[in-house]
Image (cartoon, grey):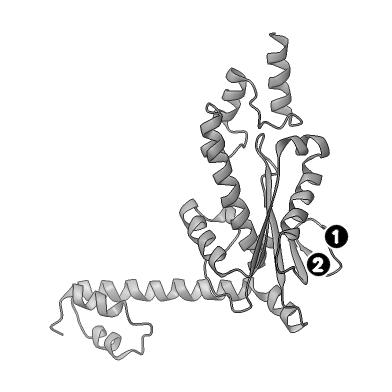
Amino acid sequence: MSDSISTIQKKLSQVSSRNDPFFQLCLNDKRKGVQKLLISVQKKWEKEAQLKEKLLEMKQYEIDLYKQGYKLIAGVDEVGRGPLAGPVVAAAVILPEDFAVVGINDSKQLNETKREALFELIKQQAISIGVGIIEHDIIDKVNIYEATKLAMRKALNELEPKADFVLIDAMPLKYQDSELSIIKGDTKSITIAAASIIAKVTRDKLMKEYEISYPGYDFAQNMGYGTKKHLHGLDTLGICPIHRLSFSPVKEAKLHFDSLK
């Protein structure tokens, strides 16, 4: 073959099967650069096949529900139960039946760049998205578990059109009769995983904004969780307006600084 390595690379990028005549032709090219390209493109195909298989696996709950006649299946998940500061955020997402974006998984298993890219794709393709944000003061009043349920209900209430079936990550919500709670649902259901991404990216953006208003706690990096830098901020600065007073390290910091007055 007389084509240059760069030309072959461009042509191989358009090939999707070992049976393609051009791929077969490349197999006879003994140049090391061409053989490396063939190995690379086959690894790419294997990765794409794995992602498609994972997508099908993640859609099984939804596929079963479509067969039962449900059309608008919402996945619900939350982010932010554990932090010492900021809100708890829930999202509800209804995806179209033919949704085929690969790579969606529990938001905690994705890096920030991947999460934000998927966030945009989900927003573009979803039938409906609802977000529920419950602030720190309500968390202190009702406890984090009840606040999480409030956030989930708020997210579901924002959906338009409304869901005819609801899949929820972990906790029973009792929002409507047609719902199912799934343990580790953000790794098993495509709609719950999509909701996890929407909730995570939404909350992270809020915490990065809070970093500007309340510097010294490293909110842009820890998202309000009790990291070493966050705890150092509590020890040296005391609490700020978005801290959860019912959480132990915050409560202790407040008592300490109150005692100094």
- The image shows a total of numbered marks equal to 2
SS category of the residue bearing label 1: loop
Instruction: Give how far across and how far down residue 161 sits, in percent.
Output: 71, 69
**Residue 129 position in % (x across, y down):** 65, 62
Judge by depth and name the residue closer to the eye, 203 or 48: 203
The N terminus: image quadrant: bottom left
Dividing the picture into quadrants, the one containing residue 60 is bottom right
Answer with left or right where residue 106 lies relative to residue 182.
left
Q: 2 or 96, which lies in front? A: 96
Which residue is painted at 58% across and 33% down in the image? 227
Q: Where residue 259 is drawn, which disc sits there?
A: none
Residue that mark 2 sits on: 179
Near mark 1 (Cα within 10 A), the count class, few <14, some 14-19 or many ≥20, is: few
Q: Residue at x 33, y 82 (%)?
A: 15
The circle drawn on residue 174 is: 1
Report if the CB atoms under discs 2 and 1 are less than 8 Å apart: yes
Q: Is residue 150 visible?
A: yes
Residue 218 is at least partly visible in this image: no
Q: CA distance from mark 2 to mark 1?
A: 8 Å
Return the residue found at the far left: 2
Judge by depth and name the residue closer to the eye, 54 or 88. 88
Q: Secondary structure at mark 2?
A: strand
